[in-house]
Every structure is written in structure tokens, then in C-alpha cells.
Image (cartoon, rainbow, N blue to C red):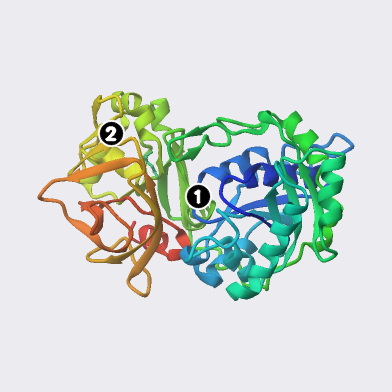
Amino acid sequence: MNGVVIGGTRSGVGKTVATLAVIRALEAAGHTVQPAKAGPDFIDPSHHTAIVGSARGSDGSRNHDRERVSRTLDAWLEGIEGLRRNYARGDGDICVVEGVMGLYDGDRSSTAMVAETLDLPVVLVVDASAGMESVAATAVGFERYAAHAGRDIEVAGIIAQRAHGGRHERGIKEALPDDLTYFGRIPPEPDLEIPDRHLGLHMGDEAPIDPATLDEVAAGVRTDRLLDIAREPPTVDPGDPGLAREKRVAVARDEAFRFVYPATMERLRARSEVVTFAPAAGDDVPPADGIYLPGGYPELHAATIADGPVLATLRDRAAEGVPILGECGGMMALAESLMTVDGDTHEMAGVLPAEIEMCDRYQALDHVELSARESTLTANANGSLRGHEFHYSDATVGADARFAFDVERGKGIDGEHDGLTEHRTLGTYAHVHPESTAFDRFVDAL
Ligand SMILES: NC(=O)CC[C@H](N)C(=O)O
């Protein structure tokens, strides 16, 4: 699958909207697009997933008929081979990879590292709202910096963000040197703003950009030029399809539990039967050999979750020794209590000895590395596990708390440990990527 990387000069330059416009433009031209996101974030990919597959070809037909979930590409979490495998499992004739932060930012997995690992060309999104020739100068700087940074990447050209048509656009195009291609512009347009909340933008299904507006914007993207530069990464075996599906895993999936890497679902589905349930809609946990509670926003649905049947069932299953994994928001539901920013305290499942309190700012936001202390559910061949933490909540743990991990980098639950464990239940602030193999261990432990 050919691909391109949409990199930015900085965070907040408009990469997500540019990426959505590129996806939409390529689909309108008849292509089947696999979206992807550099870095561990769950939110931007939800916007890709919400928009992909919704464009219609010029004959009015849909280009494909199934949901195409945006893939997470992180060189540090997945490793070089893992990242290439994850890419290779994508589905489409072209992959559009949205970068993270500025092109070179991030010492463990920058957009530039992802582009280099996959040998994909970079299209740079440059803010053109207050510049013309300077837009070109910025692009030249980003191109030249690759050699200085020792990154073997090609900055192929730019998308001008917040650029008007006519004189403004002409000025930018004329200023670009021959080796930088103009791939189009995104107009200054207030309807393209995606609303924020704690942890980032609203999710794609909650705050969709009006598709008609996006289509107008997509008309400014030069798909012919993008297709010219798109190329294929080094080939890699996409990995084994998995074992027999003897076991059943129940996965919470709703507005409260929504931070799930597609690779995680694939890994679970390849090795077990997956049933989903929606605690925020009042669902109970279906019968299963193991339970996975991903992160999300349980604090926004705490009263509904507390009133429903799910917490009592989690408590019973945990005591029966059913393996349960809760990541961040999932761990919060397994804790004793959850206090929201309004000061309301809700009782949670009470499996793990922690009281959770929502704060009004980030308590952690970074990659994490954990080493296993005692656990059947975790750790790869090196005894370490890589993940990502981002949350506003803080946990106060009881003196009797038992932890599965020491924190090698990051914050974990108390600054030194992560992975509260009781019975065969594990709660982490880390979101683990399946390429760091925790999920194989989890499924094996069923
Ligand atoms: N990453 C998550 O699952 C976040 C959980 C919760 N919304 C918090 O901010 O703490």
C-alpha cells in the first residue's frame, strides 16, 4: 500500500483538518484510503475513522463498504518491525498518515521517525495565514533540517493551511523552489474548527466536521500530485493470523470506554471471540473468559455506570478469578470510588484499592516504560512493556496496594509503580500497544 505522511510545522497547525481533506479528496478521486496517525493518540484517529469511507465517487457510489479504522503508528511503542507490520495490515490502495506535533518533535517517536521507518514522503502543513514567501522559507527550513537531524526523509512539498485563493495562493506557489511541490491549500474557515475538551479534541463521532464543508475544502487538494509521490514502505510479513478462537473476551466499548487501538481489537479478534458491551448505556458484562476495559471518559458517565449492573458484575467476576484488564479510564471503573470535578463521588467496582479524583489539568502525558514485578498478564521478552499515559485523574492508593510494575519512565499510578493488581485483575494508567505484546500475555492468561 502506497502512503504519504502529513507532517506539520508544529502542534495545532491544522494537520487533522488537512489530513481529513486529503482523505476526502482521494476518496472522491476513487481511491480506498487507509488512515493512520503517528504517535499514541486515540483522538485524532477517531476523526479519520469518522470521515473515511463517507465520500462518494463521481458516479455517486460509495468507494467501499466497511469501516476503515485509523491505525496507530508509533516507532517507540511498536518498534521498527512492529510499526511496519502494523502498516502492512492496513487495507486500501493508499495510506494517509497524520503526523504528531511538529515534524521533528518527540525524541522517541517523532513523525520524522515514522516517515523514515516506512520510507514515506512527507507533505508539510504550513500555516499560511500571515505569510506568502515565508511559507516557502519555512518549508525549505524543514526540508534542510532532515540532514542536520540525521533523518533520511524526503519533505516533498507543502499544504498551505489557512491560505486564501488567488493572489495569496499564487504568491506561495511562486515562492516554492522547484524541489518542493505545492499540494494545495486549506482555506481559513471557522467551520473547520473541532471543539476541545480535556485530553484533546472531541472524538470524531461526537464532533464531525460538516462533510459538505470538508468536500469544498478537499477540492483545493492536488490529489494527482499526492499520488505521484506516494510510495510503498519496505515489505514485511504482516504477522501470524492468530490461534484458535476458543476463548471469549468481553470488551467495553461506548462513550465512556473508547480509547482502543485498532491493532488491539485485531489481536484480540485473531485469538479469541470478542463480544462488546456498553456500560454507559446500562449494559451488563456478557459472559466471557476475560474482560477488557479500555480508557476513555468514565467520569463523564459515572452516575450511569454506577447505577447500572456492570460494577457489581465486575466485582463478582474479579473475585471468581476472571482475568480483567482496565487501562486508565478502565482502571478507574475498577477502583473504589471516582470523584468528578464537581466534587461528586461515585462508588465504582471496588476491585482495586484506589480512590480516583478528577483534576482540572493533565496529571500525565507521555510514553511510559514499565518493568514487570509480578504478573502473569504482562511484559515482553525484555521484561519491559511500553505504553502511553494521558489523563486528568489522580489515584490515591491504599497501603495494601499491590503493583505489577515498576515505572522505568513516566508516572504510573504513584510515580514509581503501575498496574494495581487483585485476584487476576490488573489496572494500569498505561495504555499498552499490542505490539509490545502485553495482549498476547493477557489472552494467553485466559
Ligand atoms: N486515558 C484515559 O483513559 C483517560 C481517563 C480519564 N478521562 C482521565 O482523564 O483521567
- Tell me the tag on residue 354: none
Give SS at disc 2: helix
Which residue is more in the foreground, 213 or 118? 213
Task: Name the amino acid, label 2.
Answer: Leu
Q: Which residue is mark 1?
A: 41
Position of 198 with respect to 105 (left or right) is left
Q: Which residue is mark 2?
A: 311
Q: Residue at x 71, y 32 (%)?
A: 189
Which residue is more in the foreground, 443 or 418? 418
Q: Residues within 10 Å of mark 1 (few under 14, many from 20)?
A: many
Residue at disc 1, CB closer than 8 Å to ligand 1: no
Position of 221 with respect to 308 (left or right) is right
| Residue 43 visible, this angle | yes
| Residue 93 visible, this angle | no
Q: CA distance from mark 2 to mark 1?
A: 27 Å
Q: Which quadrant would the N terminus be assigned to in this image?
A: bottom right
Residue at disc 2, CB closer than 8 Å to ligand 1: no
- Provide residue 372's location: percent of width, then percent of height: 27, 66
Q: Residues within 10 Å of mark 2 (few under 14, many from 20)?
A: many
Residue reaching furthest to the right: 59
- Provide residue 305's location: percent of width, then percent of height: 33, 28
Task: Name the amino acid, label 1.
Answer: Asp
Circles 2 and 1, Cβ within 8 Å, touching? The answer is no
Give SS at disc 1: loop
- Give residue 48's quadrant in the image: top right
How many numbered tags mark residues here? 2
- Provide residue 445's location: percent of width, then percent of height: 33, 60
